[in-house]
Amino acid sequence: MRQRDLSTAIPRTVPAAPLAERAEERHIKRILAEPQHADIVSRLAQATDGKLYLIGSFLYRNLSSALIGTTAKASDMDFCVDGRIDMQKLSKLFGQIEQNRRFNALMITHKDAKIDLFELGHYDFVPGDPYAHSIMGYVRGVPFTVQAIAYDIAGDRIIDGGALLAILRMEIRVNNAPKFRSDPERYMKQALRRSQEMGFALRGLEEA
């Protein structure tokens, strides 16, 4: 598989897309308006200083369910913030907070929900990339194309690095080849698990 030129492959945002293309934002906004999710988002917004993004399997699996009818939804939620986390406020709003030292993320349990939260500035998703410590760096740096998506909650917009096309094509491809090659056995297992759970085909992984 030909490696993407990360210096030019800038994820697209779709705040001004035609109405037909905004079904994705409407769907995610509707899910986040559900009481249990709205409560979580409200608390996180109070405890963070900066833009809050929904990322991870909750986002792309729920979009997959809405767009093509897959049934493998996710209940655990992942967020990142382009700014700072106020640990005192976070603890006051959620209670006990644990730390995932491997991924430098905070782990929160709220009622029946499990939540991961991290600051974008702590990650160098694509070393040497001017977008490395931003949401663009996250979207460009995740291992697989189906993961290459984020939702700007306050801005009500999707930042898409190829995930929507991957969902429509029902395929899993490598998004960040250097990351995949850094631990191919681990990432191949992740790809196989997602393929089995979502019913997506694996494409080009052996060429990454």
Image: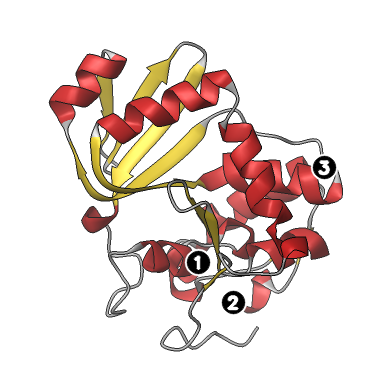
Give the structural element (helix, strand or loop) at label 2: loop
Q: Please give the label number shown on residue 70.
A: 3
**Separation of residues labelled 3 and 1 (CA atoms):** 26 Å
Which residue is most to the right?
Answer: 69
Give the structural element (helix, strand or loop) at label 1: helix
- Residue 6 at x, y percent in the picture: 45, 83
Q: Earlier in the sequence, mark 3 or mark 2?
A: 3
**Circle 1 residue:** 180
Kind of residue sitting beneath label 3: Thr
**Separation of residues labelled 3 and 2 (CA atoms):** 27 Å
What quarter of the picture does the N terminus occupy?
bottom right
Q: Which of pointers 3 and 2 indicates the residue nearer the eye?
A: 3
Which residue is at a point 35% across and 38% down the rendered structure image? 117
Residues at discs 3 and 1 in contact (Cβ within 8 Å): no
Q: Total marks drawn?
A: 3
Q: Earlier in the sequence, mark 2 or mark 1?
A: 1
Kind of residue sitting beneath label 2: Ala
Give the structural element (helix, strand or loop) at label 3: loop
Q: Does 29 appear above or below 207? A: above
What quarter of the picture does the C terminus occupy?
bottom right
**Circle 2 residue:** 208
